[in-house]
Image (cartoon, helix red, strand yellow):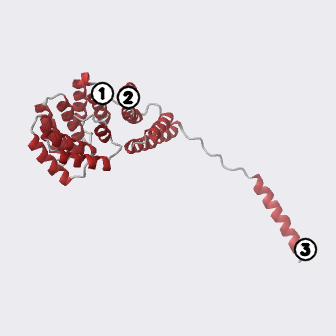
Amino acid sequence: MKKIILPILALLILVLGFGGCVQQPRVAEPTKEEKSARALQSAKVHTELAGEYYNRGQMDVALEEVDEALKAEPNYAPAYNVLGLVNMKLNDDAKALQNFTQALKLTPENAEIRNNYGWFLCQRVSQQMDQAIEQFTQAVQNPLYTTPEMALTNAGICEIKRQRYDEAQAYLRKALLIQPSYFTALLALVDMDFRRGRLVEAKSKLIELMQNNSPTPESLLLAIQIEQAIGDQMSADSYIFQLQKRFPDSREAISVREGKIN
């Protein structure tokens, strides 16, 4: 038996020895196109994460994700778009303006960026309201824009802001033709009635709207303003309680606590 075992051991050693000398196949280096595609995908993922954190109110993490997106792809327009929204939320309007203009420079055909830029101008640069409306108009004219009712509603809200009520109503009606139950547009119509002094009509519409939709900080604040204008402080206090309980950290709740509502 020993004479049989020894040759087998020798053969195993020989095979293993040769096996150790076999070269591993070389992994091909990714092509330029593959590297570009990977960088773009990384930028897309980080930008989407930044948007999620923005919606959650976690601005610090959103900024980190945008930074990672721009490291992967320095000219990724959607990242500058989200960065503009974040800086707007942080009240750094100078940076936000830079971000939106850079995003549009990279992709001037992007309707979502135009909508966000228009909203920034409407809310923070009131002397450029005409330009804000133009941004909304261009967004709506883009046949690839999937939510034109949003830009139309924003245009209506901005026209309400400068008391051009006929124009505002036209924009809001167009938005509701596209999306009849669009809450933001319906709430804007109530706000317009309130601002025009149609308090009974505004209250009736708002009650109906809130019966069919979950309350938001915006709708509760408007309810408070309407009730106070009517002179029903008890009802106003009820809405104040709801606002502070449901949305204590909202801008609207803070403004009520600081007595800054009008």
Quote the CA–CA distance across marks 1 and 2: 10 Å
Q: Amino acid at mark 2?
A: Ala
User: Which residue is disc 3 drawn over?
Assistant: 3
Residue 146: quadrant of the picture: top left
Checking the image for residue 176, the label placed there is: none
Quote the CA–CA distance across marks 2 and 3: 85 Å
Checking the image for residue 124, the label placed there is: 1
Looking at the image, is mark 1 or mark 2 earlier in the sequence?
Answer: 2
Q: Nearer the viewer, residue 191 or 261?
A: 261
Mark 3 nearby-residue class (10 Å; few <14, some 14–19, many ≥20):
few
Estimate the x, y position of residue 38 in percent, counting from the top left: 50, 41
Mark 2 nearby-residue class (10 Å; few <14, some 14–19, many ≥20):
many
Any part of residue 174 in sight: no
Looking at the image, is mark 1 or mark 3 earlier in the sequence?
Answer: 3
Q: Which residue is at a point 82% across and 65% down the rendered structure image?
A: 11
Estimate the x, y position of residue 37 in percent, counting from the top left: 47, 40
Q: Which residue is at a point 10% across and 36% down the rendered structure image?
A: 197
Viewer-nearest of labels 2 and 3? 2
Q: Residue furthest top?
A: 127
Q: Amino acid at mark 3?
A: Lys
Estimate the x, y position of residue 81 in percent, counting from the top left: 37, 34
Q: Is residue 249 toward the left or the right of residue 25 in the image? A: left
